[in-house]
Image (cartoon, rainbow, N blue to C red):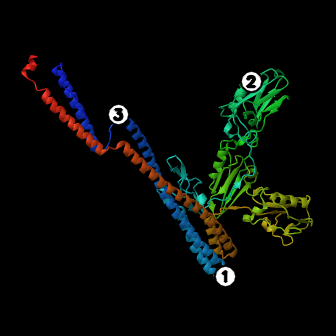
Amino acid sequence: MAVTAINLPRVSQNLRAFNLLESLRANQAGLYRVQTSLATGLRFLQPSEDPLRAASASSLDRQLAWMNQVQSNLGKVNTTLNEVDTATQEALDLLSEAQALAVQATGDTLSTEERQALATVVDSMIDRLITVGNRKHLNTYLFSGLQGALPFERTASGVIYRGDAGRMETIVDTDLAESSFTISGLEFFNAVSAEVRGFVDLDPAVTAQTRVCDLNGALGRGVQLGRIVVSTDTETVEIDLRGAATVGDLLDRLSASLPTGVTVELGPRGFVLTRDPAAGEQVTIREVGGGRTATDLGLEGSFTARSRTGGDLDPRLTAMTRIADLRAGTGIDLNSGLVIRNGGQAATVRFDGVETIEDMLNRINEADAGVWARLADDGRTLTVQSRVSGSDLSIEENGGLVATALGLRSLHGGTRLSALNGGRGVQTATGGDLRITTADRRVINVALEGATTIQDVLDRINSAGRGAITAGLVRQGNGLFIADNTVGAGTFTVEALNYSTALADLGLDASATGGRLTGQDVNPLRVDSPFTALLELHDGMQRDDRAALSEAGERLDRVIRNMQERQGEMASRARVMAERAERVEAEITATTALSSEVRDVDFAESIVRFQQLQTALEANLSTALRILNLSVLNYLT
């Protein structure tokens, strides 16, 4: 540290004093900065004092703030996962107890009274399992999905699930990676039934409002917009279709740019091009630069006819699809409505005033039938699932064909026989299964061996009857019917043949009335959940029904395996999150150390600098005392 010279020759006294003051100010400012650094432990208090280090420190601060937020997220994630693990283990322990009771009750050692007494124990298990399913952590239900509603509630029909299929997610890494940290009751408890999966492609028509992103395209791969070239005998134009949001946008661009004599309009499935004599004999549409727009729109190629209908753009079914646009624009008559039967509840769903798919789904979901209706993932059909464990779901006709037209009837012609009766199917016998006697005493034997669907059964019966009888699906309710078309003094009957169980398996083991036999629904869907298993176990014990107890035990085995798989998945996720938390903590430690190197003062260096500045200050003061010691001669000169 040098001392500033103030004894300059041939200068005025004022300049010497000014130089002295500047030197003293510089020393004092340096001392102040060093003292502040020693007092605060920081190299700088303002970015202007050290711009390079300040920029680095600011960047590190942002990183630390982000890491601390991630660490906070991971803390909540890990505590939640621990709570989930505890709850899932409690549920599995409870079901293991129920499994032991099922084995005990199925045996021969208990009396009817003892089994009925055990039903009370199972009833308490149901309530305890509901309590586990409604477990809360951080004021959030662990198994409700994303809705945050109370997940499970016991009703007269069973146990209803009011949550959804979502999982809570958050950012769990400094690279912005997100991960879920809860599991819905739909997944862990399998709280909804298998789907009544729509068996009809509702095939919405293409409209001007249809979004391009909702088109499957002529080849089923979507529509990639680019440029196309349209040529006639006299003219060639290039049309840029990029950026179009709707089919109406595409129609406007094509209409504005097509060559003279070529026009375009929108049909129910896609574009229709028309050629008049002004366009010549041939119109050609081709791609530009290896694109695929013309192909996806079903327009690629040449035509010489008066008009050409492009390929089916095959729009996806969306919530905003209008009912009138279904079936390629012919629509569906929903006037008769449909019936949803779920356990002891039966809801007649009316669709008056409904305009869109969303309106229709809302009517179904709001019918208080304990079901969840939504668009299927295939973008063509609808699905309905039961939310109520312990009850049977059926979707039936209400005197019309609405359920069939929507593809939602739970028993229909395409229903596979192997799916009936809870998966037990239909057992046939060699040589014939049904013997039908008509009023005119005609005997009709029907063999069902080799039939795979309900329609196969109906076709076999109708073919064997040769007009004497008619078999079909009932228009009111859900089941098969067989009607006698003959007249006579005999009694119309339908009996099992060759000891076949097919009659009962098809729900036709009933008495005919007025020449018509109406069967029962043999394809109800049931939620395959632990609540269903416990409710079945409870009912089996109350009725002292060994077969029901055995089925409940089998369901318990199945649902426990599924729940153990889900528990293992969450345990694996918890281990990953714990390791991630350790890594983030290590990153925070390393970043904090780096930030300290950039921002924190080196005390040894600062102390030495302080001593240097103090020595320089003392030297300046001492020099000034000698140099600026004025006399009378200074004033004379």
Q: Secondary structure at mark 1?
A: loop
Q: Amino acid at mark 1?
A: Asp
Q: Secondary structure at mark 2?
A: strand
Q: Nearer the viewer, residue 267 or 232?
A: 232
- Given this view, does label 3 or label 1 mark the residue nearer the observer? 3
Provide the residue designation for mark 3. Answer: 48
The answer to whether residue 151 of the structure is visible from this angle is no
Is 100 placed above or below 466 here? Answer: below
Q: Amino acid at mark 2?
A: Val
- Given this view, does label 2 or label 3 mark the residue nearer the observer? 3
Mark 3 and mark 1 lie on one chain; the one further toward the N terminus is: 3
Question: Would residue 434 appear left or right of 17 to someone viewing this image?
Answer: right
Q: Position of residue 222 (x, y in %)?
A: 71, 40
Label 2 crowd bin: few (<14), some (14–19), many (20+), radius 10 Å = some
Seen from this angle, which residue lies furthest front? 9
Provide the residue designation for mark 2. Answer: 237
Q: Amino acid at mark 3?
A: Ser
Label 1 crowd bin: few (<14), some (14–19), many (20+), radius 10 Å = few
Quadrant, the C terminus: top left
Spatial CA distance of label 3 from label 1 is 90 Å
Question: Would residue 93 appear left or right of 411 to someone viewing this image?
Answer: left
Q: Nearer the viewer, residue 9 or 485?
A: 9
Mark 2 and mark 3 lie on one chain; the one further toward the N terminus is: 3
- Label ID, residue 108: 1
Q: Position of residue 542 (x, y in %)?
A: 63, 74
